[in-house]
Image: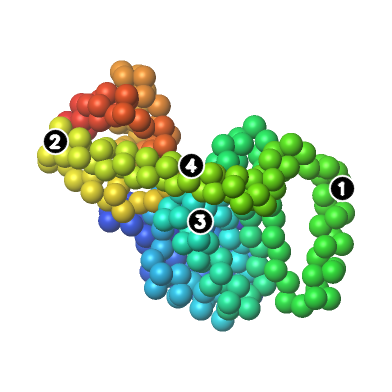
Amino acid sequence: MKNYPYYDAASHGVNFAGMTAALEGLAPGTIVVLHACCHNPTGVDLSSEQWGRVIDIVASRGLMPFLDIAYQGFGDGIDSDGEVVRRFAAANLPMLISSSFSKSFSLYGERIGALTIVGSSGEEAVRILSQLKRVIRTNYSNPPTWGGQAVALTLTTPELRALWEDELGGMRVRIKDMRRAFVEKLKALAPSRNFDFVLKQRGMFSYSGLTKDQVMRLRNEFSIYAIDTGRICVAALNSKNIDYVTQSIAKVIA
């Protein structure tokens, strides 16, 4: 297991030069985990042009992409958030794709998801399936039943799917509204600090730029809990707590 550079704290963006340099130095056959949208934990996604460069490197180096798409629908929409996966598929690359419905269906207790593997040929797909069955049998034998049935029923029933997509869209808009309120309120409370980068991030999470000491103060003095890295869950913000949270942050960064 190795890490590759991704987040650039100074710019609150992607260290793309460091990332591509690391990918170009990997041995053929190396599995590379990539977040297809709504990057966790940073909230910072690659641009369309940057994804094109990553796909080129993966193809030329013979790497195996493992695309994690746990937050599809929380960025720009279900179809738009799946674009990166389709681009890798269009490049005719073998790949692994992990999908999750725990968040988009609010089925955390069921932990519903799927692993999709794209092989280089039909014959290879048969061999992969054989190996997967062995792993599944020794690992969990049978998957959870009810969550999977709920998701399958929803996705295959037009009326239910339309209702789900509408509710998911409402959550996506709410998260974006919370990002906007977070930035606007902190701009008024702490005008010397710029949090505009939070608006460019996508999905449930954000690297807020808060230091470990500031996070500890929020925890100890204001009972606001965040990860030591400064990662916050934007989805946990709402109209009832946004004022208290931003006022508390303004005090610890003063």
Q: Crowdedness of circle 3 by 10 Å Cα count: few (<14), some, many (20+)?
A: some
Q: Tell me the mark number nearer the camera, choosing from 3 and 4.
A: 4
N-terminal label among 1 and 3: 3
N-terminal label among 3 and 4: 3
Residue plotted at (66% across, 63% down): 96
**Residue 14 pos. (x, y %):** 37, 60
N-terminal label among 2 and 3: 3
**Residue 47 pos. (x, y %):** 38, 66
The residue to which callout 2 is attached is 188
Q: Is residue 13 visible?
A: yes
N-terminal label among 2 and 4: 4
Identity of the amino acid at label 1? Arg
Q: Secondary structure at mark 3?
A: helix
Give residue 232's quadrant in the image: top left
Q: Secondary structure at mark 1?
A: helix
Q: Nearer the viewer, residue 105 or 236?
A: 105
Q: Secondary structure at mark 2?
A: helix
Q: Nearer the viewer, residue 80 or 141?
A: 80
The residue to which callout 1 is attached is 137
Q: Crowdedness of circle 4 by 10 Å Cα count: few (<14), some, many (20+)?
A: some
The residue to which callout 4 is attached is 167
